[in-house]
Image (cartoon, rainbow, N blue to C red):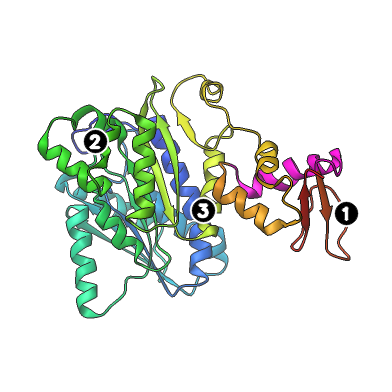
Amino acid sequence: MAAVSGTRWPITPHTRAKHLILKRHLDAWLPIMTQVNSQLLFIDGFAGPGRYEGGEDGSPIIALKAAILNRRFQQAPPKCDVQFVFIEEDSARVAALRGELETFTREHPLPSWVSYEVELDEFAPYLSRELGRLAREGGRPPSTFAFIDPFGYSDVPMSLIGRIRQIPSSECLINFAYKSMNRWAAGDPTRERHLDELFGTTGWREYWGNEQELVQLYRRQLVAEAGFRYVRTFQMRGSLDITEYFLAFCTNSLKGLSVFKQVAWKADPSTGRVFSDASDPNQLLLVNPLPRLRDLLLSRFRGGGWVDISRVTEYVLVDTDYSETSHLKQRTLGPMEVEGPSVVSVERPAGKRKRPGEYPDGTRLRFGG
């Protein structure tokens, strides 16, 4: 996105899409995590003023709404304390944010299980101090979702992402600010040092100017250096259909990965990978279409004998762009089964009905006859 100045600024379509991704993920994450934790922490590392120039909700309001306006929680409050920490380094924006939060909580009083703090500070130094303090005191942070959405790239070191990963059940949604680094960083020693910290390596220089190679390097570093098991990226493009940034979602949970992929496919029903402000919604699909899931399954499993449905499901979830909940059974395996055993043979557990599109636990498949 373009650099901003002042306390508030207009919202862009791709920012709306980013916030919708955040909202939908929190709508699913909070009910799941409150069932298995006594405490949860949401960190907004670059919180902003709380509201945009046109009155649209900022990420802090979106996050609080995901908790207190959730219908499930209104019917049955969770036995889990959820804390929200909003970090912002600009004093004017902090004042605006506090005012917005006061107004919001007057209209929507917080239940006893929800609390928040606003911190006037820089994200990386603040979180480093807090994690260090907890370590010295022998404490452990609660399961954490960190929304890390800077305007640039200078305050998100890979080493800090790795410390977040060490928190059990932690997840991150990170703005990888490709346009900002591509425009300003090369040739400036200070900015290049920030990139070394961002990537956790000097190897980015080898790929400079190559968008896909740089984002893939960042993804690999989030796995190899930060230690996250699963990382998905989602591209955000501006009105000229040029990349503004990528969102990088990081988790160690197959369930978390599944939830994010479902959210991504709602944001981009064509590929689950890209949102563009450009007026032609089909342009990106024409440039870079996905291979058919049918073909991917045959390539991976053909001739390999019988395979359990759980292995097929995990392959789709982890190793393809598709959502295993939305695309696998009814939309892909069902039509393949109708084609006949030369395409896929199916053995369902005893007592289960033999209906194409339904593959209960224990089902076995054999691809290619």
Examine the rendered structure and indicate whether residue 225 appears above or below residue 169: above
Examine the rendered structure and indicate whether residue 33 appears above or below residue 20: below
In the depicted view, which residue is nearer to us: 84 or 311?
Answer: 311
In the depicted view, which residue is nearer to us: 319 or 65?
Answer: 319
Provide the residue designation for mark 2: 205
* Residue occupying the far left of the picture: 189
* Residue 363 is a magenta residue: no
- The mark nearer the N terminus, 2 or 3, is 2
In the image, which is nearer the foreground, mark 2 or mark 1?
2
Q: Residues within 10 Å of mark 1 (few under 14, many from 20)?
A: few
Name the residue: 45% across, 37% down: 17
Residue 4, picture quadrant: top left
Provide the residue designation for mark 1: 354
Name the residue: 40% across, 56% down: 64
As measured in the structure, the alpha-carbon distance from the residue carrying label 2 to the one carrying label 3 is 30 Å
Contact, mark 3 vs mark 1 (Cβ under 8 Å): no
Name the residue: 24% across, 67% down: 131
Provide the residue designation for mark 3: 257
